[in-house]
């Protein structure tokens, strides 16, 4: 049975080095609107590694919010007139500056969100990749041309900037999800206001300081603004603000419904990236090495605190016993502990509340007839929030696995035929990501058909987690239906105009209408 990795890394020394490199203080202004604005209230940043205080970030209120909105509106008026290629060039330079500070930024994420080193570094790399993607995107904001039914007419569409966009992000990806929205929206010509999770405010300060330096070097308007604060105060101000035609929100289904209702009531748009309850189907023909690695990464990465985390493994009966034993071996050998240590595979949960939800879910699973095969213990919650990832044998009568518990619990199921596996995958209300591990072409075809997986992301012989930035990210059903990052997700941040151009000397009307004047 695994235990807490006792090999220590001095959190204080890592924090001091990262803070110095990133220009972070123990107390920091938490609102940026072309200038850093001091506030009377502060948010305390606590490291889930050892429960130590990392520092304090100023929390904005309505006065600071109004300044942020005004700055964002003025910046938009200037920024939207700048050629898209120039906007892309500036975003690319932000990516270069992120590259220079990659190690310290990644460590900042590990300190504040509890991610292991490789995941913290990977999140900053994702930001760099999005910036590079946006350089090319700035030359590809394409519109269509259509054949007109009228002589001497041309019919086409163009895309124009939408306006100031608000981005509300969650604790588990405190950096990259902002870049999916902010970099793409800014290349589209929008200004961006960011409200990060109050659980990870220091990371937002570090990033905004880098962004600020680039915008000043390029003599660009303050397109990117930041306001830290609670969801009850700042969050509600954002949702009700008519100056924001679009609000992008990442968080729980419950909160997402509230966001959708409030923004829709003023006829605004939303991009919603909500819960995931993701399954991996392991066929009897699956490559065992690939499937075990893929499911283990999906279930254990970020201590099960990804919206794309694998929460259900649906295993063919012919390989069920072997596969479960292999997963048990991985779980029992996985090193749990300080994420700053290079050998650690599973870091802490974000806070004490997450530990409670982990324990409550497992207790309910047992009451409903589930069997804990390994793990499930709380290792420590006074000096850091550590648990042993749990593997639970489940059945269709249970209710708990139909919900999303943001913690490392993997429910395992046995199936006989492939149709049963797809039905079990689709039975939950969330619809973000699904994986299929198979070597069977017929199963692959059924999986990708109209009656196959009903999720926004489908993966074949790879994990539910770890999406690339080039594809549009998002899900269906209770996941919200939003799309961010690659492909044509940029259209969310612009408005479409259909243009009819008459270059003739008469005025023929469509549908053969003859209007005598």
Image (cartoon, grey):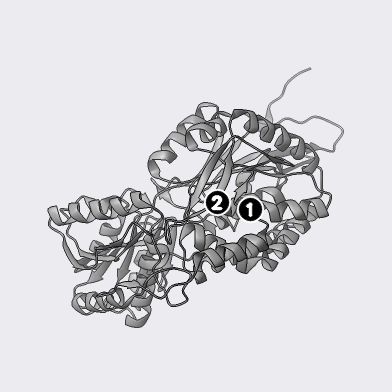
Residue 499 on image: x %, y %:
73, 38
Residue 317 on image: x %, y %:
19, 73
At x 68% / y 57%, what residue is drawn? 23
Residue 80 on image: x %, y %:
77, 42
Secondary structure under the numbered disc 1 in the rendered image: loop
Separation (CA) of disc 2 from disc 1: 7 Å
Q: Are marks 2 and 1 in contact (CB under 8 Å)?
A: yes
Q: Nearer the viewer, residue 462 or 211?
A: 211
Q: Earlier in the sequence, mark 2 or mark 1?
A: 1
- Residue labelled with disc 2: 55
- Residue labelled with disc 1: 25
Quarter of the picture containing the N terminus is bottom left
At x 38% / y 79%, what residue is drawn? 290
At x 47% / y 76%, what residue is drawn? 342
In the displayed structure, 463 sits above or below 502; it is below
In the displayed structure, 271 sits above or below 508; it is below
């Amino acid at each position: 049975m695994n235990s807490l990795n006792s090999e220590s890394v001095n959190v204080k020394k890592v924090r001091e080095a990262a803070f110095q490199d990133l220009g972070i203080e123990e107390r920091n202004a938490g609102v940026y609107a072309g200038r850093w604005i001091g506030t009377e209230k502060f948010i305390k940043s606590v490291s889930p590694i050892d429960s130590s205080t990392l520092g304090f970030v100023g929390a904005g209120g309505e006065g600071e919010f109004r300044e942020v909105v005004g700055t964002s509106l003025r910046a938009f008026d200037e920024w939207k007139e700048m050629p898209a290629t120039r906007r892309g060039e500036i975003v690319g330079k932000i990516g270069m500056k992120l590259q220079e500070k990659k190690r310290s930024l990644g460590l900042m994420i590990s300190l504040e969100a509890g991610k292991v080193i490789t995941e913290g570094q990977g999140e900053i790399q994702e930001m760099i990749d999005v910036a590079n993607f946006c350089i090319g995107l700035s030359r590809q904001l394409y519109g269509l041309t259509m054949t007109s039914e009228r002589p001497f007419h041309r019919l086409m569409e163009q895309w124009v900037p939408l306006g100031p966009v608000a981005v509300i992000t969650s604790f588990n990806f405190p950096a990259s999800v902002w870049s999916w929205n902010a970099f793409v929206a800014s290349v589209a010509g929008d200004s961006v206001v960011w409200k990060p999770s109050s659980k990870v405010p220091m990371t937002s300060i570090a990033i905004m300081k880098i962004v600020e330096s680039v915008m000043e070097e390029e003599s660009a308007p303050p397109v990117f603004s930041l306001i830290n604060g609670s969801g009850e105060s700042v969050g509600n101000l954002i949702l009700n603000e008519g100056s924001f035609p679009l609000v992008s929100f990442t968080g729980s289904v419950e909160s997402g419904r509230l966001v959708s209702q409030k923004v829709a009531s003023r006829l605004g748009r939303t991009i919603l990236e909500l819960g995931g309850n993701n399954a991996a189907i392991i066929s009897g023909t699956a490559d065992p090495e690939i499937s075990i690695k893929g499911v283990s990464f999906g279930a254990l990465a970020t201590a099960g605190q990804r919206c794309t985390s694998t929460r259900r493994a649906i295993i063919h009966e012919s390989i069920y016993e072997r596969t479960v034993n292999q997963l048990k071996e991985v779980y029992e050998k996985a090193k749990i502990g300080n994420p700053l240590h290079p050998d650690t595979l599973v870091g802490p949960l974000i806070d004490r509340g997450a530990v409670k939800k982990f324990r409550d879910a497992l207790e309910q699973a047992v009451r409903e007839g589930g069997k804990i095969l390994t793990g499930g213990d709380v290792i420590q919650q006074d000096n850091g929030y550590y648990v042993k990832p749990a593997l639970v044998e489940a059945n269709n009568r249970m209710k708990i696995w139909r919900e999303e518990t943001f913690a490392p619990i993997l429910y395992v199921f046995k199936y006989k035929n492939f149709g049963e596996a797809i039905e079990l995958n689709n039975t939950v209300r969330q619809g973000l990501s699904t994986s299929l591990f198979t070597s069977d072409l017929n199963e692959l075809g059924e999986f990708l058909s109209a009656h196959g997986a009903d999720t926004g992301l489908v993966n074949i012989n790879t994990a539910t987690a770890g999406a690339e930035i080039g594809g549009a990210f998002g899900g269906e059903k209770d996941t919200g239906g939003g799309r961010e990052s690659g492909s044509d997700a940029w259209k969310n941040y612009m408005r479409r105009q259909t243009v009819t151009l008459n270059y003739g000397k008469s005025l023929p009307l469509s549908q053969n209408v003859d209007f005598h004047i």
